[in-house]
Image (cartoon, rainbow, N blue to C red):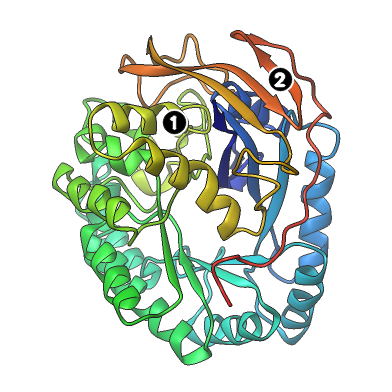
Amino acid sequence: MIPGGVDGHTHMEMPFGGTYASDTFETGTRAAAWGGTTTIVDFAVQSRGGALREGLDAWHAKAEGNCAIDYGFHMIVSDVTEETLKEMDLLVEEGVTSFKQFMAYPGVFYSDDGQILRAMQQAAGNGGLIMMHAENGIAIDVLVGQALARGETDPRHHGEVRKALLEAEATHRAIRLAQVAGAPLYVVHVSAREAVAELARARDEGLPVFGETCPQYLFLSTDNLAEPGFEGAKYVCSTPLRPRDHQAALWQGLRTNDLQVVSTDHCPFCFSGQKELGRGDFSKIPNGLPGVENRMDLLHQAVVDGRISRRRWIEIACATPARMFGLYPKKGTIAPGADADVVIYDPHAEQVLSAETHHMNVDYSAYEGRRITGRVETVLSRGEAVVTEREYTGRAGHGVYTPRAACQYLD
């Protein structure tokens, strides 16, 4: 018996590259429940020129009455203005206590260093947590243009232009901007060993800096991006998959607590009709992978393989994300007064991951054919069974919006 998983990084119905993530809040939270996750924190998006409130209201409307499990929101800040900064204070007061910024995607979500610094200063004052997509998007766009001009259009080039050094450089810059602002920092989807080294150095200095990685970086690699034909498009996400030799640093970071959380960055696009938008131009492949259903099982496989302890599995998948995002002790633990989010888990059952049997609304599995040991049997959300002995007994609308306190790792 384990606590329900907390996935602190999902993108249901996320608009990207002229299309939308294929999981709705209904299908995505049902799949999460099947995988032993009982709480997600999704990202509401501020449109450029729009208010934070407009974006948050739009995401509330998508989710309300549709979720099988409980949910909260982070806020993507893509337009830092005086009004935006004031709104951040109001959102923190009502339980949206984390704000994501992007050093990547110029023209879409990108913020420059000055905008990032101002948002960090605001967070330092209001108790919010800045989450950072740390890649040097300005430099990457130059490399993308050069690759396409050379006729390098296949999916594998997506990984080659989004260089590990540009993830490390942006991670370093984000850490130092946060230090100047006196703000805590949470770096999302860390994939490169050079970026882990930046986080480790900052934490050794005593800075309130945290890091997240995702199953795709722990279990997949550039070998997948290089699969023949257009198959590699299935694995296009940002930060990108890295060469396999980066994985050891990520596992080490999880063991030493230089990385604290494993989330999914679940942002699925169907291979047919969505990923295919980038045939002949890797820069047009929608960025994102499905994974919300697989995280708990893949991390249990890591326990079986001796990479992490069973206790560490619970920490990185349940307890730490709950504390990081102000949900503990309602979430992330089995204790008196908690929400009774409980998973009955069979550590010996074997299963084969496959698109034929998963419940995510996407036409492929990033882990197709992978045999793993461990499987969810029964899932309770707030004491109510949503999966009962491998049968779905939940319903859309059971899941409720959950306001969050500030990050519980800060004074």
For badge 1, the amino acid type reads Glu
**How many numbered dots are placed on residues in this image?**
2
Q: How many residues crowd around disc 2 within 10 Å: few (fewer than 14), some, or many (20 or more)?
A: many
User: What residue is shown at x 51% (from left), y 16% (from top)?
Assistant: 358
Residue 179 on image: x %, y %: 44, 87
* Depicted 21 relative to depicted 196: above or below: above
* Depicted 372 relative to depicted 276: above or below: above
Between the residue at mark 2 and the residue at mark 1, the CA separation in whole angstroms equals: 34 Å
Give the mark nearest the N terminus, 2 or 1: 1
**Residue 31 vs residue 283, the one in the foreground:** 31
Instruction: Say left or right for 294 vs 254.
Output: right
Confirm whether residue 230 shows in the render. no
For badge 2, the amino acid type reads Val
Helix, strand or loop for disc 2: strand
Q: Which residue is mark 2?
A: 386
Q: Quadrant of the N terminus?
A: top right
Looking at the rendered structure, which numbered label has been put on residue 397?
A: none
Residue 352 on image: x %, y %: 36, 11
- Foreground disc of the pair 2, 1: 2
User: What residue is shown at x 18% (from left), y 47% (from top)?
Assistant: 248
User: What residue is shown at x 37% (from left), y 66% (from top)?
Assistant: 135
* Depicted 21 relative to depicted 198: above or below: above
Residue 32 on image: x %, y %: 59, 29
Hey, which quadrant is residue 403 in on the image?
A: bottom right
Check the image and name the residue furthest to the left: 245
Helix, strand or loop for disc 1: helix
User: What residue is shown at x 45% (from left), y 36% (from top)?
Assistant: 289
Q: Which residue is mark 1?
A: 276
Instruction: Say left or right for 192 vs 278.
Output: left
